Amino acid sequence: MGNASKSPMRRPACENSFRKVPETSTEPAPIPEKQELLFHEVLALFEQNTIAYAVAGAFALREHTGIYRDTKDLDVFLTPKNAELAFACLRKAGFQCQICDPRLVIQGAPR
C-alpha cells in the first residue's frame, strides 16, 4: 500500500471551469435595447405575415419556468414551409439570412 494511499487526490483540470459558467437566475438580466427591438421586429414581422412559430431557447425557459438565462439570440421553431415564408419575409425587410443546416439551424442577421 505504501505512499499511494497518502498522496493527495489530483483534481481534474476542468473542475474550475464550471465556476466561470454563468448561472441561471430568477432575476432577469437586462437585454440591450437594440437587441430587444430587433427581437420584437422579427416577431412582429412573423405576426403581420401570419407565419406560425414557437419561441424556444432562453425566452421559452423564462416564460415556462421562471428561470432566466442570459442570451444573445432569439430561438424560434418553424415548420419547413414556415421557415421558407419567414426567410422571404425577413429578406424583404432587409435582413440577411443563411441556412447553416437545413434540418436544424437558420441564421438571420439585421440589415
Image: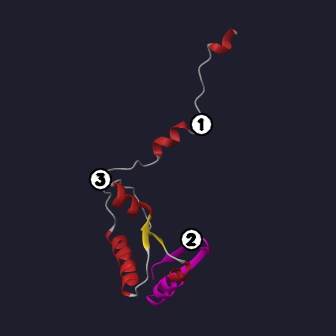
Q: Amino acid at mark 1?
A: Ala
Q: Residue at x 46, y 84 (%)?
A: 90
Q: Is residue 65 above or below residue 6?
A: below
Residue, far bottom: 92
Q: Nearer the viewer, residue 71 or 34?
A: 71
Residue bounds of the magenta highlight: 84-111
Relative to 11, say whether 94 is above or below: below
Mark-to-mark CA distance, 3 and 2: 29 Å
Magenta residue check for 74: no
The number of numbered badges drawn on the structure is 3
Q: Quadrant of the N terminus?
A: top right
Whole-percent x, y for residue 70 in the image: 40, 57
**Which of label 1 and label 2 is nearer to you?**
2
Res 59 quadrant in image: bottom left
Q: Tag 3: residue type? A: Glu
Residue to which mark 2 is pinned: 105
Q: Amino acid at mark 2?
A: Val
Q: Which numbered dot is residue 13?
A: 1
